[in-house]
Amino acid sequence: MTTQLLGMAAIVLLAAGLFFFVYGEIGLQDSRVNRLLSAYLSGLDHHLKFIRSKKSARNVFVLQLIASGLVGLFTVYYPLGFLLIPIVLLAPVMQLKNLRDKRVIRLESQLDSWLLVLANALKAVPSIGEALISSRALAHAPISEEIDVAIKENQLGAPLDEALKNMANRIESRVVAAALTTLSIARKTGGDLPATLEASAAALREMARLEGVIRTKTADGRNQAFVLGSLPAVLIVALYFAYPVLLEKLFNTSMGHVLLGVAIALWIGAVVVAMNILKVDI
């Protein structure tokens, strides 16, 4: 009991010292911690704005700090709680990236139909600006939201090509960037712009079909990678509750903590490498 109290007091003092150190560093405008924190919050804010979330980056960061404190207290009584630290640190970023990727996929799936709508609108009106406004009314979210932002930028004085470039930069999709670049080039060089957009829409549909085939062919590999990636954590949890003596030195000694940290780092690296191998681009 005394050992646990001393351990909890040490963790509380360490957390308090870390808090005051970080707080003092944040107060310095040119400190490294302040620059890293600003970059991290800027990245979170970028993702939150893109997915049209009402939450702020600082709220997400505060929740992370609270969760980290709870994990630290949990680790005093259950050393296995050390495994939750990477989850607390990476979960918000990975969740936001997942939501962003889903939105980009939806935008890409709507791109060919929007190009056809835009091509038909150009057959009725000669101005590309008026055609964009007409296509906004016929498109569905989320692509209608991005078109609306581009139209508002153009109405506020930005050139149409710049508004389309900003739209591609916001979405950060190779497919969307290629389609918008084709639209800008065809608009500058002249020619049959509706026919060019219809050809681009047909090419996008063919790319989507090929990506679907590749996704189906690599589904088994992704499932195997998921099972193999989650197996070490499952085995450690099972051994901890079935034979806790086997893992006593791993969780209660300094060398065990070092080995556990190295194992977690190698585990995360292996999962990342496996996911990159299974990611096939066409």
Image: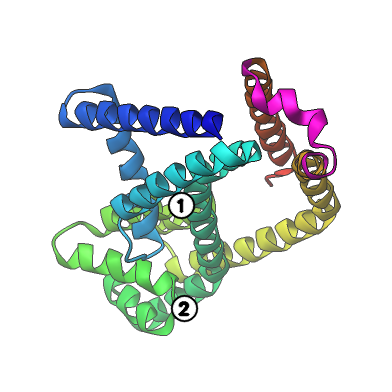
Q: Quadrant of residue 3?
A: top right
User: The residue tagged with tag 2: helix, strand or loop?
Assistant: helix
Q: Along the horizontal axis of the image, is 126 left or right of 221?
A: left
Residue 17 seen in the current view: yes
**Mark 1: which amino acid?**
Ala
Depicted 262 relative to depicted 264: above or below: above
Q: Along the horizontal axis of the image, is 150 left or right of 4?
A: left
What residue lies at 82% left-to-right and 41% top-to-bottom? 235
User: The residue tagged with tag 1: helix, strand or loop?
Assistant: helix
Check disc 1 and report the residue beneath it.
177
Rendered location of residue 108, percent (x, y)? 54, 63
Rendered location of residue 170, percent (x, y)? 37, 53
Quadrant of the snapshot with the N terminus? top right
> What are the residue bounds of the magenta stretch?
239-254
Residue 198 included in the magenta stretch of the image: no
Depicted 73 relative to depicted 177: above or below: above
What residue lies at 67% left-to-right and 28% top-to-bottom? 251
User: Which secondary structure type mostly characterizes the magenta part of the structure?
Assistant: helix
Q: Quadrant of residue 258?
A: top right
Check disc 2 and report the residue beneath it.
117
What residue lies at 31% left-to-right and 27% top-to-bottom? 17
Rendered location of residue 259, percent (x, y)? 68, 20
What residue lies at 16% left-to-right and 31% top-to-bottom? 27
- Taking depth in this image into account, of 245 and 90 the one nearest to the observer is 245
State the CA–CA distance, disc 1 to disc 2: 18 Å
Depicted 216 relative to depicted 134: above or below: above
